[in-house]
Image (cartoon, rainbow, N blue to C red):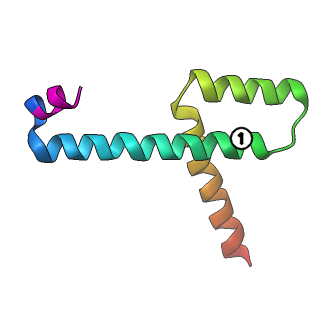
């Protein structure tokens, strides 16, 4: 797979794409951990788990939205 990336994008492009994929994975794991840490009713928690697993961009978007919400809360202080 990395050889195919290297053939299409060269060294710098394949390095950049690999780095972005790694960052996405880290943010996805952080988003899933954040979703799991909240206390919700069981049926709502199951919905959030399902969204996090079957729609990989959802935890990343949730993480970004949570960061924006916390930034707004800190600015009020």
As helix, strand or loop, the secondary structure at mark 1 comes to helix
Query: Which secondary structure type mostly characterizes the magenta part of the structure?
Result: helix
Image location of residue 45, percent across then percent down = 81, 30
Badge 1: how crowded within 10 Å, few (<14), some, or many (20+)?
A: some
Residue extending farthest to the right is 41
Quadrant of res 29: top right
**In which quadrant is the N terminus drawn?**
top left
- Give the tally of numbered discs: 1
Examine the image and state in which quarter residue 5 appears.
Answer: top left
Q: Residue at x 65, y 52 (%)?
A: 66
The residue depicted at 79 percent of the width and 24 percent of the height is: 46
Q: Residue at (59%, 20%) from the top-left corner?
A: 54
Report the side of 73 relative to 13 (left or right).
right
In the image, what residue occupies the spot 66% across and 57% down? 69
- Find residue 41 and report its image quarter: top right
- In the image, the segment drawn in magenta is 1-6
Is 17 located above or below residue 56 in the figure? below
Q: How far across and down, in percent of the image, does residue 19 sit?
A: 31, 47
Residue 68 horizontal/vertical position (percent): 60, 58
Q: Nearer the viewer, residue 47 or 23?
A: 23
Q: Is residue 45 above or below residue 54?
A: below
Q: Position of residue 11 (x, y in %)?
A: 11, 44
Residue pointed to by mark 1? 35
Left or right position of 53 against 8: right
Q: Quadrant of the C terminus?
A: bottom right
């Amino acid at each position: 797979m990395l050889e195919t990336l290297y053939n299409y994008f060269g060294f710098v492009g394949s390095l950049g794409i690999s780095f972005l994929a790694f960052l996405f994975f880290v943010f996805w794991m952080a988003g899933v951990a954040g979703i799991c840490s909240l206390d919700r009713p069981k049926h709502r928690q199951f919905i959030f788990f399902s969204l996090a697993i079957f729609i990989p961009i959802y935890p990343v978007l949730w993480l970004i939205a949570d960061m924006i919400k916390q930034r707004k809360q800190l600015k009020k202080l």
